Image (spheres, rainbow, N blue to C red):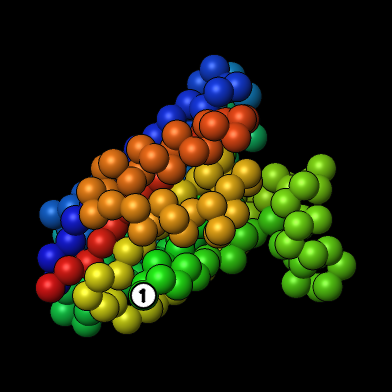
Amino acid sequence: MKLTYGGRTDVGRVRTRNEDALLERPERALFAVADGMGGHAAGDIASRMAVDVLDEATLHPADDVAGQLEQAVRAGHGAILKAARADSDLDGMGTTLTAVRLLEESQEWLVAHVGDSRAYLWRDGDLRQLTRDQTWVQDQVDAGQLNEAQARTHPFSAMLTCALGIGDVDLDVQLIRESARHGDLMLLCSDGLTARLQDSDLRPLLASTDDLVEMAGAMVDRANEVGGPDNITVCLVRAAD
Ligand code: CA
């Protein structure tokens, strides 16, 4: 399976720093988005560390690709914790991480995920969120205490229940496998895209062009048009025969 891709990361309209990180490694069919948090410059450092460690830890072919990807996420968590312990300015830094690999042999998408960035699959005009947000509001939605609209506007909407660099080593890494089909389009994004834009806003953009760099730019522009309160990162990957 061949792939095409396009990505863009943007500071948004309100923030002065971009704490998101984007990783594009088409030669390994590996892509990732990370959304950092923390005082000083620590958010930038955490998200960059997460994608750099992921990049390095997946350099070599592995028999167990899913195990390798999960370990790479855990290694990033460990590296961030270690750096924060060594420098009080970095104390409390953390990051989300959502990564995807397109597996050539098994013709599958493999997603690894921690936090509230997201992976969506756009197939035959249908948009499906593959990842589950690790947030307090998502827990409330799952328990029937809040609906989706209430969760989106809730004052605690950004409160994560799990992130790299936060807490002890007990990291809940979601691993998702999905068979890949010709024409599939994978969307990875930080919450700067999805906090303000809903599926109904994204669908027309996903259908708008075959040029994924242009599409990523259009998504970022749209998020900025509705206020751009947060950093916005979009990574699009299409599978083709
Ligand atoms: Ca964010």
Name the residue type under label 1: Asp
Looking at the image, is 162 positioned above or below residue 217?
below
In this orientation, which residue lies closer to the viewer: 107 or 81? Answer: 107
Report the quarter where the N terminus lies: bottom left
Q: Residue 44 at x, y = what percent?
A: 47, 29
Above or below: residue 154 compared with residue 176: above
Picture residue at 23% right of the left edge, 48% below the top: 211
Picture quadrant where residue 149 is located: bottom right
- Report if residue 107 is visible in the image: yes
In-image side of 187 versus 40 (left or right): left
State left or right for residue 144 relative to residue 60.
Answer: right
State whether label 1 is within 8 Å of ligand 1. no
Q: Quadrant of the C terminus?
A: bottom left
Q: Which residue is mark 1?
A: 124
Q: Nearer the viewer, residue 153 or 141?
A: 153
**Residue at left 72%, top 51%?**
152
| Point 22% across, 67% down: residue | 239
Relative to the observer, which residue lies in front, 89 or 218?
A: 218
- The x and y percentages for residue 187 are 40, 57
